[in-house]
Amino acid sequence: MPNATLPAAEKQQRRVETAIERLRVVVVKSRGSADVADEAAKAISHLNTLYAESKGAFSAEDVRYANVLRGYLGERLAAHKPKTAHTKKAKRKGDKLDHCWRCKTAVDERFSDECPTCSEKAYKWRVCPICNACGCQRAGKVLI
């Protein structure tokens, strides 16, 4: 069936599927080289733009899969950097995990930034230096 005759919702769903597939391809490429970082940033930006336009086009499975891909991407790009030792930080009051919720990176001195968008007075969300996860994704403000 040609694209011109598809309903708008189905067109949007196909755009979402294509964007997620583009991210998946970048994640596969990232296993061999960190040179795909710019391509990955564009794929992530495109997915977040689609999500901002139409959250309804993303199923719960699409959201989970995109976040899994983003976690793997962060881990793989970080693996291409030189190995260094990091000092683990203790859990803060209100922290449920001692690692990033998405990529499982242990909380250490690299977790120095706090997200101004999703942080509140009672709890400040740390931004993962590997996959850029914070509370925005969990709250549904952005996709990945």
Image: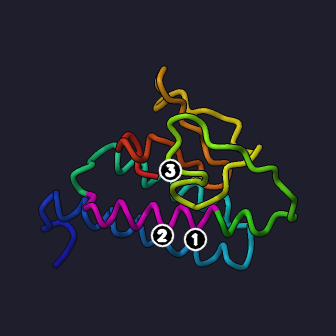
Say how the picture is coloured: rainbow
Magenta stretch, residue numbers:
58-74
According to the picture, the residue beneath numbered tag 3 turns out to be 45
Q: Residue at x 63, y 61 (%)?
A: 74
Per the image, label 1 sits on a secondary structure element best described as helix
Q: Splitting the image into 4 quarters, where does residue 66 fall?
A: bottom left
Q: Position of residue 70 (x, y in %)?
A: 53, 61
Say what amino acid the circle numbered 1 marks.
Val
64 falls in the magenta region: yes
* Mark 2 to mark 3 CA distance (whole Å): 12 Å
Say what amino acid the circle numbered 2 marks.
Arg
Judge left or right: residue 13 versus residue 1.
right
According to the picture, the residue beneath numbered tag 2 turns out to be 22
| Depicted 137 relative to depicted 33: above or below | above
Cβ–Cβ under 8 Å for marks 2 and 1 = yes
Judge left or right: residue 109 versus residue 94.
right
Q: Position of residue 129 (x, y in %)?
A: 68, 48
According to the picture, the residue beneath numbered tag 1 turns out to be 26
* Mark 1 to mark 3 CA distance (whole Å): 13 Å
Say what amino acid the circle numbered 3 marks.
Ser
Q: Position of residue 15 (x, y in %)?
A: 32, 63
Mark 1 surroundings within 10 Å by alpha-carbon count, few (fewer than 14), some (14 through 19), many (20 or more): many
Question: Between 107 and 9, which is closer to the camera in this rendering?
Answer: 107
Disc on the earlier residue, 1 or 3: 1
What's the magenta bit mostly, secondary-structure-wise? Answer: helix
Cβ–Cβ under 8 Å for marks 2 and 3 = no
Disc on res. 86: none
Mark 3 surroundings within 10 Å by alpha-carbon count, few (fewer than 14), some (14 through 19), many (20 or more): some
* Mark 2 to mark 1 CA distance (whole Å): 6 Å
Question: Between 129 and 54, which is closer to the camera in this rendering?
Answer: 129
| Depicted 64 relative to depicted 116: above or below | below
Q: Residue at x 54, y 36 (%)?
A: 125
